[in-house]
Image (cartoon, helix red, strand yellow):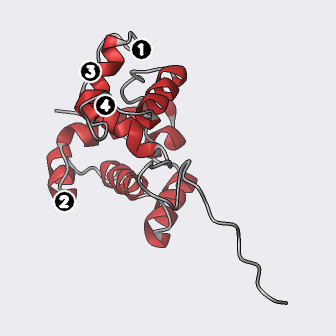
Amino acid sequence: MPKKNKVILRADQRKTLLKIIKTGHRKAREILYAHILLKSAQGWPDEQIAQAFDISTDTVQRTRMRFVQSGLKAALQESPRPGAPRQLTTEQETRLIALACSKPPDGHARWTVRLLAEEAVKRGMVPGMAPETLRQILKKTPSSPGNSKAGAAETSPQTTWPA
């Protein structure tokens, strides 16, 4: 069965792909896509290419399709992956950090992540929040109330060294 998206390389494209493979100063996926395009142009079947590079036949087909539809540059680069949308606004994160730096409720020596999440929901700062989400937010902040080297803790005056 003939391929729908047949790869036909011009001499300059083949030279570019060979340079990418030989120099090795590119992203691993870009080098992989260069290999796929070269093997496709040589007439290798998708299954053989997939087996040779330990990838799926879908990867081979998508790479060929990107080349035929959009050209060499598009075939060598992936489109950016958007990732999950942010769950909280910057203002909500700031309020949560301020809450974490405040005095814990009576009966508790310090804030726990679970306690902070419950308090944030109770105060209406966020509609609902998993403790893990809050932990990840707090992990990104450089302040640490228990650490005298960072955050809002008092610092000693800087020592000056003799010249």
Q: Is residue 18 above or below residue 113?
A: below
User: Label 3: which residue?
Assistant: 118
Numbered label attached to residue 125: 1
Which label sits in the foreground, 1 or 4? 1
**Mark 1: few/some/many CA within 10 Å (<14, 14-19, 20+):** some
| Residue 143 visible (yes or no) | yes
N-terminal label among 3 and 4: 3
> CA–CA distance between discs 2 and 1?
54 Å
Residue 141 locus on image (x, y percent): 48, 44
Disc 1 marks which amino acid? Answer: Met
Which label sits in the foreground, 2 or 1? 1
Q: Assess whether mark 4 and mark 3 are in contact (beta carbons under 8 angstroms).
A: no
Callout 2: helix, strand or loop?
A: helix
Which label sits in the foreground, 3 or 4? 3
Callout 3: helix, strand or loop?
A: helix
> CA–CA distance between discs 3 and 4?
12 Å
Callout 1: helix, strand or loop?
A: loop
Instruction: Give the camera-side residue of 48 and 84.
Output: 84
N-terminal label among 1 and 3: 3
User: Label 2: which residue?
Assistant: 52
Q: Is residue 12 above or below residue 65?
A: below
Residue 57 locus on image (x, y percent): 19, 41
N-terminal label among 2 and 1: 2
User: Label 4: which residue?
Assistant: 133
Residue 2 locus on image (x, y percent): 22, 33
Which label sits in the foreground, 2 or 4? 4
